Image (tube, rainbow, N blue to C red):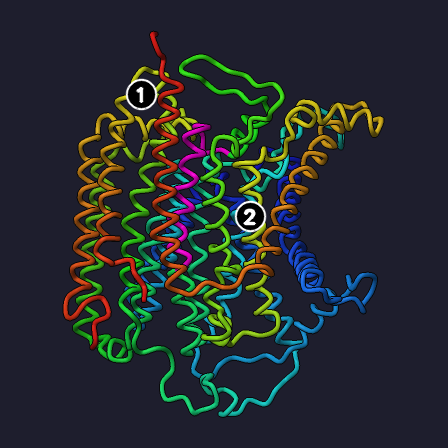
Amino acid sequence: MGTDAFEFTINFVKMVAIFLMMVQIVPLLVWVERRGSAYIQNRFGPNRVGPLGLTQLLADAVKFLTKEEFVPGRGYPFIYYAAPVVAMIPATLALAAIPLSAPFHVEPFEMFGRNWGPYTFMFQGYDFGIGIVFVLGVSSLAAYALLLAGYGSNNKYSMYGALRASAQTISYELAMGLSIVGVILLFNTFSFTDIVNAQSAPLNFMWFGKKVVVEWLPNWGLIYQPLGAVILFAAMFAEANRLPFDLPEAEGELVAGYHTEYAGFKFNMFFIGEYGHMFVASALMVIFYFGGYTIYPWLTPETAPQIMGKLLGVTSATWMSFWGSILLHLVLMAKVVAFLWIFIQVRWTLPRFRYDQLMDLGWRSMLPWALFNTVITAIVVLLMRYQWGA
Amino acid sequence: MLWDAIGFYGMALFLIFFALKTITVPNPIHAALYLVLTMIGLAGMFFNLGAHFIAGVQMIVYAGAVMVLFVMVLMLFDLKAEIRSFSRGLLSGALKIMSSALLVGFALGSAGSSVAILDSSDTAPTQIDVTRQLGVLLYTKYLFAFEVLGILLLVVAVGVVAVSRMKGGTHAQH
Amino acid sequence: MSQLLPVLLLSLFVILFGSALLFLASRIGAKGKPNSVKEETYECGIPAETSGPTKIPIKFYLTAILFILFDIEIIFMYPWALTYGDFISGGYGIYIFSAMAFFIAVFIFGLFWEVKSKALEWE
């Protein structure tokens, strides 16, 4: 985590900040969702408590905390309590592995009578170089929270909800994993940072062994992988158990699915997990297909420090680099927010699938299409990069 | 170096604890959940030792797929009979301890006889290189095994469907 | 260890945060009197006869096991995708493509067979 106290401290603060970001984004998203759904359905939504109803979030938190504590009599208390905590872990661990901005450099400086640095801090909790595999591995644990909740409540509806949910999550994990293969084929790396860096250049590709550069287009993954992007995004909806894939909590059939017996803050923790998944999904979409924290001609890891330097009038390399990273972070967040809005818009637009339609879509439509996407990508990459005549 | 050792042995202790719990709790679902923790810990172990990709595979395949199946299937059964049939007698306890002692002996013996794995290498290869080397080896030297694995998985898939079809189709009436 | 430390720390952090909130909620929350009717297994108005499901379609089991098989096959594509570019630039493009082409052909055959045999159909 670091070689000396300064690096360790910064890394620790960074990690806490990422966790707090994830926890804080949930009430905001809930507010956006409630106001947004009200807007879509021509209602007002929460608008009484504070400006624009924003302090409704605090009121909600107080309400959650003062709810009566309840454990189902025939349940398993430890597992019942563990499930909501487990629900938060996969999304948090995955989020911390995603680069939220370009790394920033700290030039050597003097403090407490000794010399420190130079350092380079990644704008993420940890960077392993195999980020994609790590995120997939961690998010494959998401099924356990559902199973634990269903089992811990020991109730028919919870159990059916948990079974449905986990069957759905694992089914769509296939399409998700397979659609990412196309991205890896394209960029030949498991590292998110490398993928983003590759996308911060003008559109360039090999055309039967010759290099073609299109100056006016960014090198975004979407241009090469439109089908993969659609499949991944749809699979992400199912992974996050969002409408139209929220079969596990289909009220008409299962009361509330796996969280039938949960109330108060325990219920809220499942919410944090769900919104965390949405956040991770949006960030992955942005990083794989939409240039990550860069917008090619204007904002790249090279130009951002200069822009911020001019804007804020700072000249020290450290602060320019730092503010440049913040600017790029805002770029990423803007893109992520756009995707989060799509999540919300879809939820309030589309009706729910039937369970057999859901499984059909996952296994008999999305999986074959993802496979098709992989094969086509492999063929095209081979044809284009093959050294013709060499 | 010292911290690495402490981390390694600390994790190993946790792993052994979870593994012991797996075989000593009477409720099969709890045992499966402990096995999940063991699998995750094993992934952490691989990670610790520098095999990042293998750690990821361990998470995705074992912790994320195989154990989900176990837990799901166990949840389908009425387990009261299973819990009751968990043996607590003196004889079975002795058998359990003996068999685990035998296993520990095998593990220690094999670790002791392969001295090479106990030596630490000074040049830790960079991570992405390890995964690339793995890929190159897999698709060149072990290509045959890799292709056969594909066919093996196909056979298993066919077998699963066949087994689930016994007695009146996939919606068998019990 | 130094590489795994942040992951462990973060998981510990989440667990502590979660348990602290659970504890806080149990302290602050309204105290209800437990009684046998309230703690009964949830059912839609009628007394519950069993807790937890007793019969579940074997489909769930089938789905889970087929998921494992396909998941393993997909995992094997990851190192392939990673090294694909290296193989091509090294002049072994057709080799690596055909190596995976066979594997994917088996995969597609398996998927096709599963669809044909109606194993993936939920009614």
Using a 10 Å C-alpha cutoff, classify the residue at mark 1 as few (fewer than 14 neighbours), some (14 to 19) or many (20 or more).
Answer: many
Residue A270 falls in which quadrant of the image? bottom right
Q: Nearer the viewer, residue A27 or C121?
A: C121
Q: Amino acid at mark 2?
A: Val
- Circle number at residue A252: none
**Disc 2 sits on a residue from what chain?**
A
Give the magenta range.
Answer: A168-191
Q: Secondary structure at mark 2?
A: helix
The residue lying at 55 percent from left, 80 percent from top is A70
Q: Quadrant of the N terminus of chain A?
A: top right
B166 shown above or below B152:
below
Q: Are marks 2 and 1 on the same chain?
A: no
Give the residue at mark 2.
A280
Q: Which residue sits at x=25%, y=58%?
A: C119
Q: Name the residue nearer the viewer: A288 or B141.
A: A288
Please indicate whether residue A277 sits to the left or right of residue A119 in the image: left
**Residue A185, percent across and down?**
41, 30
Q: Amino acid at mark 1?
A: Gly
Q: What label sits on residue C93 in the rendered view?
A: 1
Q: Is residue A172 magenta?
A: yes
